[in-house]
Image (cartoon, helix red, strand yellow):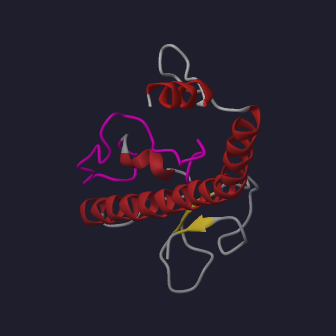
Amino acid sequence: MDVAKLSYESKSVQKSPHGEDGFTLLELLVVIVILGLLIGLVAPAVLRQLGHAKDSIARQSIERISSVLDLYKLDAGSYPTTQDGLQALIAKPDDAPNWAGPYIKGGDLPVDPWGHQYLYQLPSSRTGLDYDLCSLGNADKPGQPGDAGLICNQ
């Protein structure tokens, strides 16, 4: 019986001395192909979401700046002129005797998520709005409020 057991053990597959089994080249290639497919499918969706996130941040920033402009109007009696622009939220314009600013901390005007200054115009070129406050968005092409690519106050 010991001889049969011995011959059986000699026919079995021998393991490496440290008990480590490796992967075959085929297995590694299959894993690499699967990872490549996943990256190819997921990466465009993630990049699309990043673009939408910047649009959302720009819209929220425009709403916050609009609130600050409303505070300015309460103090000064009117919105800043187009010539004064958003700079009136940081430094007192000559035509605003009741100015109680600065209305924005830090002394710098906010920029949109793409690094551009927000565009401000009084009066608005759109009906029903007092002023236009817009971001050029990703396109970085000047235009009128309502044009494709511009993100403006509502």
**The N terminus lies in quadrant:** top left
The image quarter containing residue 63 is bottom left
Q: Main secondary structure of the magenta part?
A: loop
Closer-to-camera residue (32/36): 32
The image quarter containing residue 31 is top right
Q: 20 left or right of 74?
A: right
Count of residue discs: 0
Would you place residue 143 above or below residue 4 in this image?
A: below
Q: 23 left or right of 65?
A: right
Q: Which residue range is magenta in the image?
A: 92-119
Q: Position of residue 128 (x, y in %)?
A: 51, 86
Residue that appears at 53% across and 27% down:
9
Q: Position of residue 22 (x, y in %)?
A: 61, 27
Closer-to-camera residue (146/81): 146
Residue that appears at 73% across and 45% down:
30
Closer-to-camera residue (116/94): 116
Would you place residue 45 above or below residue 84 in this image?
A: below
Q: Is residue 7 magenta?
A: no
Residue that appears at 51% across and 45% down:
111
Q: Is residue 111 magenta?
A: yes
Would you place residue 102 above or below residue 81 in this image?
A: above
Q: Is residue 47 visible?
A: yes
Residue that appears at 67% across and 46% down:
35
Q: Is residue 120 visible?
A: no
Q: 88 left or right of 144?
A: left
Would you place residue 78 above or below residue 10 in this image?
A: below
* Residue furthest out toward the top: 17
Q: Position of residue 149 (x, y in %)?
A: 70, 65
Q: Position of residue 80 (x, y in %)?
A: 44, 58
